[in-house]
Image (cartoon, rainbow, N blue to C red):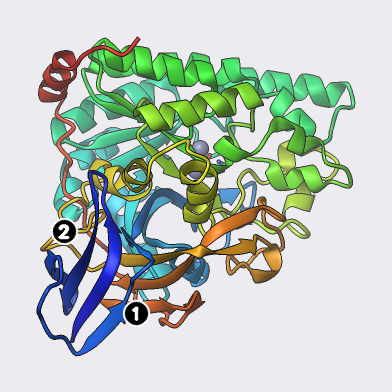
Amino acid sequence: MSLLIKGGTIVTAVDEFVGDILVEGEKIVAIGQNLNLSAEKVIDAAGKYVLPGGVDQHVHYSFDFKGQRVRGFETSNAAIVGGTTTVIEFVNQEHGKGIAETIFEYDKKEVADVAMVDYAYHGVVCEPSDELFKEIADLPGKGLPTIKLFMAYKGQPYHSDDEALFKALKAAKEAGVTVMVHAENADVIDILQKECLAKGLTGPYYHAESRPPLVEIEATQRAIHLAQMAEAPIYIVHVTAKEVMETIRNASNNGTPVYGETCTHYLMLDKEDLAKPNFEGAKYVCSPALRTEKDRKALWEAVNQGWLNSVSSDHCGFNWQDQKHMGVNDFTNIPNGSPGVENRLGILWTYGVNKGRISRQRFVDLYATTPAKINGLSHRKGHIGVGYDADIVIYDPNHKSIISAETSLHGVDFNIYEGFEQEGKVDKVLLRGKLMVDDGLFIGEKGDGQFVPGTAYGLCYESLKKEKQAQPVNV
Ligand code: URP
Ligand code: ZN
Ligand code: ZN
């Protein structure tokens, strides 16, 4: 099947021009202006933006918090309707199993037949045995070039201590695997949570009070120091606070290969949302906690300047009525995480691009191109170029809507952006050449998504260090 997308404004991370794209089967085969080529199907994209499909490198379709599990890949039509064509899912290593074994069993049982977007995986270290550290060397060969460790969540099976993190960094460096960390000081949080509860402070607001920015700052500094001692690159997920971003920026400017992402909700929402009455605040319980206007401003500047490399959703489909309410008498039992995969593009476009905080090129880089690179998918994903997968979003800028749980597909009973205006609409989405979204409506099928093996990005310490040292220093 051949398809010609005609006359749209094509936006990449580096340029923007009115042009045509020819798709043959699953791939982009030609890009040009006034392409004099015929195709079986033609899409007129005049007046619209033609963007690479989004890559959301931080989603949870299998996360478990104290026995509460998120909605799975059966809700991944929400991702593609929102303009994301590839998600990267965190899979917790199961008891007594290796990372690859856990991931591919999960893939077979719960993902391959239902996914409606392409996907890749990060393995989460839960049992840091010698065997596991040996396994890290084999992961890139299986298309799994990234692992994650949770410094937070004391008492949960996925919490890791410094010994595990340091050993993982050393093993990962040898293998060309990128280590991602959730950086918060778990012991301090545990003490602060107990202090709140002992004083009868049990509501959602105390989630934030017991996780102040310093727990994130301290853990980020520690993670970076561990990475420096292991001479390994490190990637800090969901950065929320100004000082955390500055820590990463300073270490990076001093030649350490440290990278960071933030998430849409940290750019948009506030700690005060946790104080909403009638337990509404529980909808906003995620970790690290939401911060303040000062932090949001700093994060927008950081994503614009490249001090943080990508914007993810950290999507977690927990229901408010029956799942978030587990913590109605004790905020420490509120499942951590909120949905957002459907709204990432619309929010970044409306409140980033249209408010002049980031350019369209920077937007594409943050939501597609760099996340593809970091995760070893940039040979196929995150860019509009000849030879790339035909994952394409046609965005109609002349449209306004109001975000609401009622019209969301993520399968839960709330939306953290309820009532926010969205400018523009994801009109059409192609996934490897197949039209999955038409006039904003999902028309694909379960199982259309495929596993995309990642290649070792080669966050090779020595070469990256040299590259960084050669760059001018931002102060
Ligand atoms: O609150 C969050 N972020 N939940 C998902 C798990 C994690 O920490 O990334
Ligand atoms: Zn996390
Ligand atoms: Zn997460």
Going by the numbered disc 2, the residue's amino acid type is Gly
- Residue at 40%, 69% (x, y): give it: 111
Above or below residue 88? Residue 131 is above
Q: Locate residue 167, reporting x and y percent.
A: 29, 25
Give the answer, above or below, for where 280 lies relative to 129. below
Whether residue 360 is visible to the viewer of this picture, yes or no, is yes
Left or right: where 422 falls relative to 194: left
Q: What residue do we see at 40% from left, 48% from top?
A: 93
Q: Is residue 405 left or right of residue 21?
A: right
Front residue (pair 452, 353): 353
Looking at the rendered image, the quarter that the N terminus falls into is bottom left
| Residue that numbered label 1 is attached to | 435
Query: From the Cβ of disc 1, is ligand 3 less than 8 Å away?
Result: no
Residue hosting label 2: 385
Label 1 residue SS: strand
Apparent side of residue 172 relative to residue 323 in the rendered image (left or right): left
Q: Write down the quadrant of residue 247 in the picture.
A: top left
Q: CA distance from mark 1 to mark 2?
A: 18 Å
Is residue 225 in view from this perspective? no
Along the viewing direction, whichever of 286 and 388 lies nearer the viewer: 388
Q: Amino acid at mark 1?
A: Leu
